[in-house]
Image: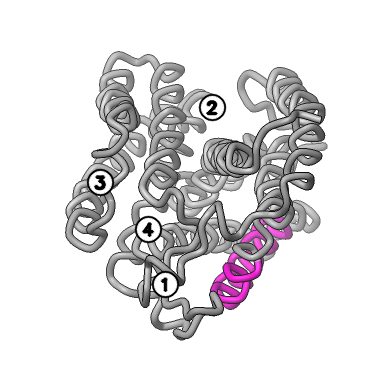
Amino acid sequence: MIGLELEQLQVVWYLLLGLLLAGYAVLDGFDLGVGILHLVVPRDDRERRIIVNSIGPIWDGNEVWLVTFGGALFAAFPEAYATVFSAFYEALMLVLVGLILRAVSIEFRGKVHAPGWRRLWDFGFGLGSALATFIFGVAVGNAMQGIALDQRHEFTGHLVDLLGPYPIVVGLLALTVFAMHGAIFLYLKTEGDLQRRLVTWMWRSFGFFLVVFFVTTVFTLDRVPHATANFADQPLLWLIPGLMILALANVPRSIFQSKPGRAFASSCLLVICLVGLLGATVFPDLVTSTVAPATNSLTVHNASSSAKTLDIMLLIALIGMPFVVGYTAFVYWTFRGKVVIDDHSY
């Protein structure tokens, strides 16, 4: 076995969960963004087909990262998993509705060659992408500010309690950053008139994101008093917001210089840093209680599995993750380049 102590294993699995979440946010983030833009960017059915086919070979593989994250959370921190799925049950069902709707829409839109049929599933693709993204953001907002947990770590609030101003603002942040991420990805995958119009949408989505990012930052400093506590104790954590600011500045710079590859790399780094900020802010909490934070919160220390379980899981992860990363890289390399539409395309 690996031979780490329990506290070390708990921190390692917290970091691994962050890595899985960051991988999902980067990979599924741009194809959710493609879905968000699907109803406003294309002008005809051919352009809609190009947009759908830009993610056609990869969207389902991207969602594997979310499934893996859920499985790892269940095995490593089962009590936190139970509390999260209990507290966010209705919200998670809405996420599933959104993900299922967009998956069905991608597969069904090309089954019948009728304008009305395709418009229906085009709308479903956009709606499902936007709904899932917004709910993800709302969940992150609640994770940042905490939820009402009693001494048994059970949620004592209601669904409406999860829809406060701060979580809604974070939900809008998720929509705008994924839209920007998706616009840059689409620019890389398209050409001609559609690609030229995507330049406008890259700037628009970046502008929307910048405004919401500023509002979210102000809200965070006001509504989440513990947001900077870990940064005071661990100065190296300031590297995360530092890298985020650099990535944020390099996105418009790269767009202006017509270097979309650099813009996309900066967008990926920006998304990773946002996930990193979440992890750095809430640690060691997995679910923060607003009722009695010191005693009712679920942390990496009181919600984890046994040392043996975490040790075995880590060994499996060290063996399996290279295959996952390798397969993902192989798929992206195979389907690199511009989108080409043929009879077998969506």
Q: Earlier in the sequence, mark 2 or mark 1?
A: 1
- Give SS at disc 1: loop
Residue at the location (57% across, 36% down)?
Answer: 19
**Placement of 150 over or under 299, stated as above or below:** below
Residue at the location (81% across, 30% down)?
Answer: 1
Residue that carries the numbered disc 2 in the rendered image: 190
Q: Position of residue 181 (x, y in %)?
A: 44, 37
Which secondary structure type mostly characterizes the magenta part of the structure? helix
- Give SS at disc 4: helix
Residue that carries the numbered disc 4 in the rendered image: 144
How far apart, in angstroms, are the residues tagged by discs 3 and 4? 12 Å
Cβ–Cβ below 8 Å for labels 4 and 2? no
How far apart, in angstroms, are the residues tagged by discs 1 and 3? 19 Å
- Give SS at disc 2: loop
Residue at the location (17% across, 60% down)?
Answer: 222
Circle 4 crowding by C-alpha within 10 Å: few under 14, some 14–19, many from 20: many
Quarter of the image with the C terminus in it: top right
153 left or right of 60? left
Q: Name the amino acid type tagged 2.
A: Thr
Q: Position of residue 160 (x, y in %)?
A: 41, 83
Q: Quadrant of residue 277?
A: top left
Q: Name the amino acid type tagged 4.
A: Met
How far apart, in angstroms, are the residues tagged by discs 1 and 4? 9 Å
In front: mark 4 or mark 2?
4
Which label sits on residue 291? none
Residue that carries the numbered disc 1 in the rendered image: 147
Q: Name the amino acid type tagged 1.
A: Ile
Q: Nearer the viewer, residue 50 or 263?
A: 263
How far apart, in angstroms, are the residues tagged by discs 2 and 3? 41 Å
The answer to whether one can see residue 51 in this image is no
